[in-house]
Amino acid sequence: MEYKDYYKTLGVGRNASEEEIKQAYRKLARKFHPDFNPGNPRAEAKSKEINEAYEVLGDAQKRSKYDHLGSDWEKIARENPFGAGAGGFHDAGTGGFQNVTFESTGTFSDFFKAFFGEIRGRETRMDDWNILRNQEPAAQKQDVHYTTEIALEEAYRGSERSMRISTQEECPECRDKKHFGRTCRNCGGTGTVKKEKYITVKIPAGVREGSKIRIPGGDGGDIYLDIKLRPHPQFQLQGDDLVLDVPVSVIDLVLGTRIKVPTLDNKRIEVVIPAETQNNAIFRLKGLGMPSLKDNPGNLLVRVRAVVPTGLSDQERRLFEELARIRKT
């Protein structure tokens, strides 16, 4: 009967901690599991060796018994042969082996049976069912980003978006352990499954280009909605302020006038243009700019653009010529 060096099988030292043994098993179980190596008899045989090694080293009581075998393992095996119904061997001395009984299916090696009896064959220990579910140390949370474009009016007053998202959720088969220790065919051993669903996201008033709205996503990571602003045909956003260009004739700039300007909330505000207003002059309407997520709202900056008259009549031209002569004197 061949001696089984379970430490060598898992690639760990005899002083390896419980966590080191578990990590080594996870890595090897993933590498050689038959579900990931279909039609490979070598991988299947290796998988059985790995599971047998972990059946012993992953159990504190079995590991202690195994470590006590030492160089006398062959003598112990001869003097305490495993017999039907005998349930293995026991040592009457202190620290010896206790009588154990298992149900036999012939999954494990003769070496294992000689010292531990036979147990119900299984690919994975049920109390470590999540080893193949995780297969590797737990992955970092993966956040997911979606981009949505909104109008400036929506950013001004707030809005909503209904969207379909893909999320990673806990595999129900793994949660309920319905695969009985074998690699889960529902999730492939990852422990999570992809699920698509519709959600409604509230976009608060005052969001800006590049704003991110966070939707908590649990263990699989969070969802972020990245905001992109659609250019507006009239208003320009500068910080918290809104800039509005308003065409005003040269005559009105010279003589003064009153104009009504629109706002993003569909109102019209009257602005007084004093006489002799210069081109590109800016009038500030306090608090009528963009809402702020933290501070006071911005302002509406009305910038006048001089419009030079065209298609002058002869009389209009003579009047401008007369004005020019007066200005020169």
Image (tube, helix red, strand yellow):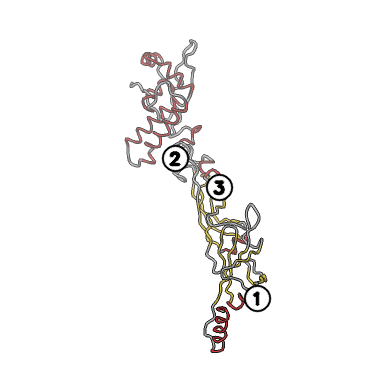
Q: Which residue does the numbered mark 1 point to in the structure image?
A: 257
Instruction: Select label 3 or label 1 by which is in front.
Output: 1
Q: Nearer the viewer, residue 49 or 27?
A: 27
Other-residue count near label 2 (Cα within 10 Å), few / some / many at <14 / 14–19 / ≥20: many
Image location of residue 214, percent across then percent down: 57, 50
Determine the CA span between mark 1 and mark 2: 80 Å
Relative side of 24 to 276, left or right: left
Q: Which residue is mark 2?
A: 183
Question: Of the residues shown, which amino acid type is indicated by label 3?
Answer: Gly
Question: 297 and 125: which one is in front?
Answer: 297
Tell me the kind of residue under disc 1: Thr
Judge from the rendering whether residue 30 lies leftward or rightward of residue 221; answer left or right: left
Residue for badge 3: 217
Residue at left offset 52%, top offset 85%: 311
- Tell me which numbered mark, 1 or 2, is placed earlier along the sequence: 2
Residue 106 is situated, as x and y percent measured from the top left of the image, at 40, 29
Q: Earlier in the sequence, mark 2 or mark 3?
A: 2
Q: Is residue 133 above or below residue 105?
A: below
